[in-house]
Amino acid sequence: MVARTFYRGVLMRHQTKLCLRLGLSAIVSSLILTGLTGCSSGPDPKVVVQQYFDALGKGDATTALSLMSELPDDTSLLTNQVLQAMNPMPQYTDMTMDVTTLPEDSSGNKGVFVNVTYKLNGQEVDDQSIPLGWYDTKWEITWGVAGLTVANQPTGLAINVNGVAAPADSNELWLFPGTYTIDSGNPIIGLKDGPTTITIDGPSSNPSLALGDLIITDTGLSTIQKAAHDKLQSCLDAWPGSFDPTCPADPLPDVKDGRAWKYSTGSTIDGITPTLDALSMQANWNVKPANGIVIEASGTVSGQTVTAKKTLTTVTIGLTEPDPTSLAAATTIS
């Protein structure tokens, strides 16, 4: 069995029109031909390409993948579930193909490009050039997916593609041709303009998508408010002697007996309205009015009640992990 060389660098990102037409460079030809031996007459490569598009039209990612000689490192979005969630399902019509045969190298290796035009759900698509190589007894597609570049995706923000979680912190997603709905996978953070749709014309496309502005969702706001409340409650209940840097400092650190605390009149952390810092994946809240939230701490020393006040002015909540427990743990109050 001949080693199946992974041609990602050239075939994935650099299938430019220059390389896909008659002026194919010797370097590109060499990369496509590497690892292809024992070539003989076999099925028309156009048949393989037709089978590939037929499978996509049926939502059959399993068959489409079986026609490819090499796969990207991550195939989590190259599934029947993702394909079958397309709306509409991809329909490839008015398809035409012609074959560009690459020159045989000194080892007898051969390869081809199948140049395809078609309509995808009624829209004209052209300049799709699909590389194939001869492996043992059959033609296989050496690269059949597109890399969707996702711009403006903050580190730690999960996104969903057709309802399926995309790989974490990946700004390039491997997808078959078709139509995809992209949305936030974090219930606390949403896309301001709602889910967005993108159509990938073909496997030699180089699509990109900017997520746009992000917002805190209604669910996210109530979850953040509860997390802040719970964190403050745990911090103040730990007085005296708590030295947690994520908690407000105890204003009576040396008073151990009879400890209690309460909000000053008119002060409360409940109902805070944070702003989203998407770049750092944090919800930040600067207390207004400027006098902040005032906590009155009390205790007893030699039978006498002593009091002190602590003013809270900032709350910062990390949003990478969206469940309430993680949010409370990721909260800093000062």
Image (cartoon, rainbow, N blue to C red):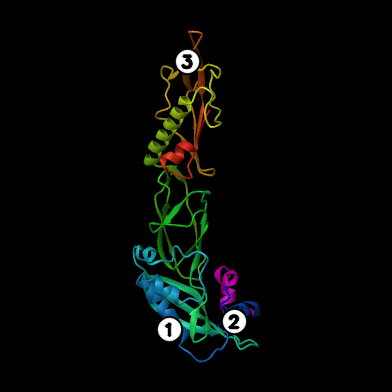
Percent x, y for residue 306?
Answer: 50, 11
**Amino acid type of disc 1?**
Val
State the SS at label 1: helix
Residue 162 colored magenta? no
Q: Residue at x 34, y 62 (%)?
A: 87
**Amino acid type of disc 2?**
Leu
Residue density around tag 3, few if under 14, some if 14–19, many if 20 or more, within 10 Å: many
The residue singled out by tag 3 in the image is 298
Q: Is residue 4 positioned above or below 158 on the image? A: below
The residue singled out by tag 1 in the image is 47
Q: Earlier in the sequence, mark 2 or mark 1?
A: 2
**Amino acid type of disc 3?**
Ser
Q: Residue at x 40, y 46 (%)?
A: 187
Per the model, the C-alpha gap separating discs 1 and 3 is: 82 Å
Percent x, y for residue 75?
Answer: 47, 65
Image quadrant where one finds the N terminus = bottom right
Q: Residue at x 42, y 76 (%)?
A: 52
The residue singled out by tag 2 in the image is 33
Per the model, the C-alpha gap separating discs 2 and 1 is: 20 Å
Nearer the observer: mark 2 or 1; the answer is 2
Nearer the observer: mark 3 or 2; the answer is 3
State the SS at label 2: helix
Percent x, y for residue 299?
Answer: 48, 14
Q: Earlier in the sequence, mark 3 or mark 2?
A: 2
Looking at this view, is 275 or 319 the one in front? 319
The stretch of residues the image draws in magenta is: 7-25
Nearer the observer: mark 1 or 3; the answer is 3
